[in-house]
Image (tube, rainbow, N blue to C red):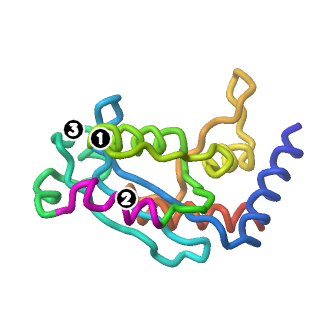
Amino acid sequence: MMENDQEIAAQWARSLLEREDWVILDTETTGLSQIDEIIQIAIIAYDGSLLLNTLVRPKQPISATAIAIHGITNATLEEAPSFPEIFEQFKAVISEKTMVIYNAPFDLRLINQTIKKYHLPQLEIDPEQVECAMLKYSAWKGEIWSDGNYKWQKLPGGDHTALGDCKATLEIIKKMAG
């Protein structure tokens, strides 16, 4: 089973690299809870070209735990645009694209929480248009937990900036494709 899952993950990566209709997205946030929001978002194209990279001024302070992870401080965001100010650009960049995200459920939850917090129109994101690179990479790595599922892998080469993590995700896709 494991070798087959590894080959399926490698084939997923190879097929992605043959297409041009996808982007890689990553966010940094004020924290991990149900009230937290996006403070940095980056999106790169399939070829690594930059489509969006911006800090985002939140309504709430960043938690000390989050600052310790990504290093973005409240002072850093004072002059940044708010999420409503970048929302249309964000929507345009992801329109009709498959979004590849490392730990997709987390980023999608924070995107939706941020949209709700600012009373913006909900995005209709088709689950078929989202790929979780972390799950594919975990299957490709093949480390098994005691419960029989694949152990989630930290993003190799990620630097806890949205853009750095997008670039690291592209690199693991290339590595998986062989």
Dot 1 or dot 2: first in sequence order is: 2
Q: Nearer the viewer, residue 97 or 164?
A: 97
Q: Nearer the viewer, residue 121 or 28?
A: 121
Dot 2 or dot 3: first in sequence order is: 2
Q: Is residue 97 above or below residue 147?
A: below
Q: What is the quadrant of the C terminus in the image?
A: bottom right
The residue under the point 29% across, 31% down is 35
Q: What type is the residue that disc 2 sits on?
A: Ile
Where does label 3 land, which residue?
A: 63
At label 2, counting other C-alpha atoms closer than 10 Å, the crowd grade (few under 14, some 14-19, many 20 or more) is: many
At label 1, counting other C-alpha atoms closer than 10 Å, the crowd grade (few under 14, some 14-19, many 20 or more) is: few
The residue under the point 54% across, 62% down is 95
The percent coordinates of residue 23 (x first, y second) are 57, 65
- Within the image, what quadrant is residue 164 found in? bottom left
Q: What type is the residue that disc 1 sits on?
A: His
Q: What type is the residue that disc 3 sits on?
A: Ser
User: Mark 3 against mark 1, which lies toward the viewer?
Assistant: 1
Q: Characterize the magenta stretch by its predominant secondary structure.
A: helix
Q: Is residue 84 above or below residue 52?
A: above
Where does label 2 land, which residue?
A: 41
Dot 3 or dot 1: first in sequence order is: 3
Question: Which numbered disc covers residue 167?
Answer: none
Where does label 1 land, which residue?
A: 119
Per the rendered image, the range of residues in magenta is: 80-92
Kindly report the distance in space between the C-alpha atoms of the residues bearing marks 1 and 2. Answer: 19 Å
The percent coordinates of residue 82 (x first, y second) are 22, 56
Kindly report the distance in space between the C-alpha atoms of the residues bearing marks 2 and 3. Answer: 17 Å
Asked which secondary structure carries label 3, the reply is loop
